[in-house]
Amino acid sequence: MTETLTTDRDFRGYGGRPPKVSWPGGARLAVSVVVNVEEGAELSIGQGDEANEATYEVVEQIEGARDLCMESHFEYGTRAGWPRIRAMLARFGTPATLNANGRALALSPWIAEEAVADGHEVAAHGWRWERHAHMGEAEERLAIARTVEAITAAAGTPPRGWHTRSATSPATRRLLLERGGFLYDSNAYNDDLPYLVEVGGADHLVLPYAFDTNDMRFQRSGGFVFGDDFARYCIDAFDRLWEEGADAPRMLSIGLHLRIIGRPGRIAGLERFLDHATTRGGVWFARRDAIARHWLEAIGRHDLVARALGRAAAE
């Protein structure tokens, strides 16, 4: 007897037949560079949190006391990593999305100011650098509100995108739509293209993110040791998607962190990738809000653009 299983998960996706969307200029591939800004939003007793962050390049948990060592590791990102990454993006003329925690920008607002001056997008990464999986609705609603307010104050405009660290709660997307102003979220890792999901009877756009083409793999035995490891892997992903883009649109996310790729022994990996990717024709380097808006307009969902931008303008 064959058991019939049901699920609300989508294992098929586009089934190899994505919408016939053309990227601007007839590009084969849209490349999204995401710079995660988390410094100051990590768990820290020194910031009044209930515990210290333990996720970094070393495995050590300090309990019941302030962890000045961990704090200094994170501070490297804003002090030295961001200037280095900022200069690299400017050198190659690469627009990026800053995936920023609200508390991080409340503590370091100049990062948002400099990013906006350079033409980058500032999107939301939650208030603290934490999972939302076990949050109650009231707590999560407050976290979303605080994040939007902090980013708006630092960047001058509200965020159009959202990305929770790791796991969301079942209510996250509904609360984002309730709040309004969001074009997309990036809380998925299951495709190479944007797609729509139904949330409480309304459509919502998801721009998948990636943990493989991501500098986080320099940490905790993730497989990257030298800057060239990052470059080679990202170049291989880029080349494959560029080839596939001859027949259908493709999107590549490159994940960066101030305190990780911003180290002098790793930044050359980003340099080598950008040198390779920016010299190839048929590539659209774009902010995630631009990708989201283009996709929605290309599939005829101007209503979703108006819903998000209209609400944001009103606020």
Image: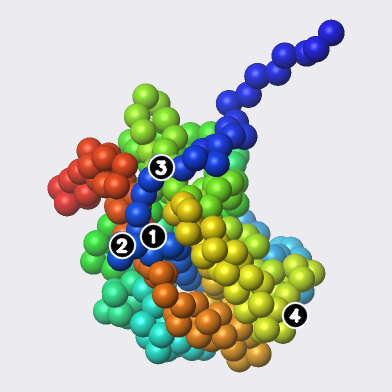
Is residue 234 at least partly visible in the picture?
Answer: no
Q: Which residue is mark 4?
A: 225
Question: The N terminus is located in which quarter?
Answer: top right
Residue 184 x %, y % = 38, 48
Q: Which residue is mark 2?
A: 24
Distance of mark 3 from mark 4, alpha carbons? 38 Å
Residue at point 54% right, 58% down? 244
User: Which residue is most to the front?
Assistant: 247
User: Which residue is most to the left?
Assistant: 314
Give 76 or 252, whichever is nearer the viewer: 252
In this rendering, would 151 be left or right of 8?
A: left
Residue at point 42% right, 30% down? 198
Q: Secondary structure at mark 3?
A: loop
Of badges 3 and 1, the one in the foreground is 3
- Amino acid type, mark 4: Val
The answer to which of marks 2 and 4 sits earlier in the sequence is: 2
- Amino acid type, mark 2: Pro
Q: Are marks 2 and 3 in contact (CB under 8 Å)?
A: no
The answer to which of marks 3 and 1 sits earlier in the sequence is: 3
Give 10 or 25, whichever is nearer the viewer: 25
Q: Secondary structure at mark 1?
A: helix
- Amino acid type, mark 1: Arg
Q: Secondary structure at mark 2?
A: helix
The answer to which of marks 2 and 3 sits earlier in the sequence is: 3
Distance of mark 4 from mark 1, alpha carbons? 28 Å
Total numbered labels? 4
Give 180 or 51, whichever is nearer the viewer: 180
Of badges 2 and 4, the one in the foreground is 2
Residue at point 78% right, 13% down? 3
